[in-house]
Amino acid sequence: MPASGGSTDAFDEFRIEEERLDRGTVVIAIHGDADLRTASELKDRLGAAIDEGPTALVLDLTGATFLDSMALGIFLGGMKRLQAKGGRFRVVAPRTEIRRIFEMTLLDRVFDLDASRQAALAATASGNGRVRPVG
Amino acid sequence: MEEVFEVAFAHPVEREFARVFDEHGISWEYEPHTFVLERDADGTVREAFTPDFYLPDFNLYIECTVMRQAHTGRKRRKVQKARERKGVTVELLFCRDFERLAQRWSLEGLGRAARGGFARGTGG
């Protein structure tokens, strides 16, 4: 059952949806602008999901409209924490403008990026991707 | 964050890359750290490595090179040593990487700087 939550007022475009699938896979979907204003909530929600110890976490940015470097840093920290526990972390980034920010920062080399949630879930099921801690 | 106009970049491609970071709101520092990779028995530094960029939000270093790939062996080895001995995340960008980024995202300045770089190369 998806659980949703999000900021209010001026930031109501931003919201996070979580979905827990079989075999310890968690999907976290980000909608709207992920930036300085929403960083605290993003960090808390991602951290809480990782604390549960999933075997895989799929960060779905299909609905994300903007990412700043703070949001990217939170993703990176989350990925490192999960990988340190032996979990897999994949990012769904089909939108051109979101893909661009990953490529410009070279983080497309650090994260496992997928064009769709389906592809990301298939990759986690097949065991593809990085499992070693990065950085 | 450093200001692109206040920094003495070693190569135009670095300046253009810094501009790209600025346009995307990415914090960057230019050559902030030097890693000692080898010392002689008396402690004299024999080999060191200063990556071009540091992105503090990601704890990520970027080394740029526009030398022909055949001439980049020494730089590759330095990057590998820094990764292994210092435990840092360093990404190495070659001329073809700049050209690919420039073409894919219509970054004319970066593409121009990269194409002009074969004759000069970058330090590091």
Image (cartoon, coloured by chain):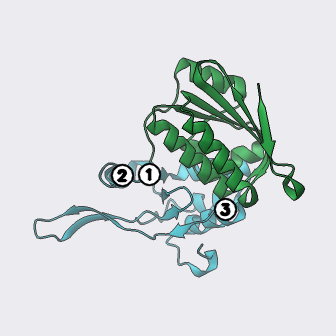
Chain colours: A green, B cyan
How far apart in space, not on screen, are marks 2 and 1 (Cα)? 7 Å
**Disc 2 residue crowd, few under 14, some 14–19, many 20+, Cα 10 Å:** few
Q: Chain of mark 2?
A: B
Q: Locate residue B38: give its quadrant.
A: bottom left
- Asked which secondary structure carries label 1, the reply is strand
* Residue position for label 2: B87
Residue at the far right: name it: A9
Pointer 3 and pointer 1 on the same chain: yes
Q: CB atoms at circles 2 and 3 under 8 Å apart?
A: no
Q: Mark 2 or mark 3, which has the lower sequence index?
A: 3
Residue A63: tell me if it is visible.
no
* Residue position for label 1: B89
The answer to which of A55 and A112 lies nearer the viewer is: A55
Q: Mark 3 or mark 1, which has the lower sequence index?
A: 3
Q: Nearer the viewer, mark 3 or mark 1?
A: 1
* Residue position for label 3: B20
Left or right, A8 with respect to B93, comes to: right
Residue B84: tell me if it is visible.
yes
**Whether residue A119 is situated above or below residue A44 in the rendered picture:** above
How far apart in space, not on screen, are marks 3 and 1 (Cα)? 20 Å
Picture coordinates of residue B2, whole percent (x, y): 59, 75
**Whether residue A58 is situated above or below residue A41 in the rendered picture:** above
Residue depicted at 59% across the width and 69% down the height? B15
Q: Chain of mark 1?
A: B
- Asked which secondary structure carries label 3, the reply is helix
- Asked which secondary structure carries label 2, the reply is loop
Q: Nearer the viewer, mark 2 or mark 3?
A: 2
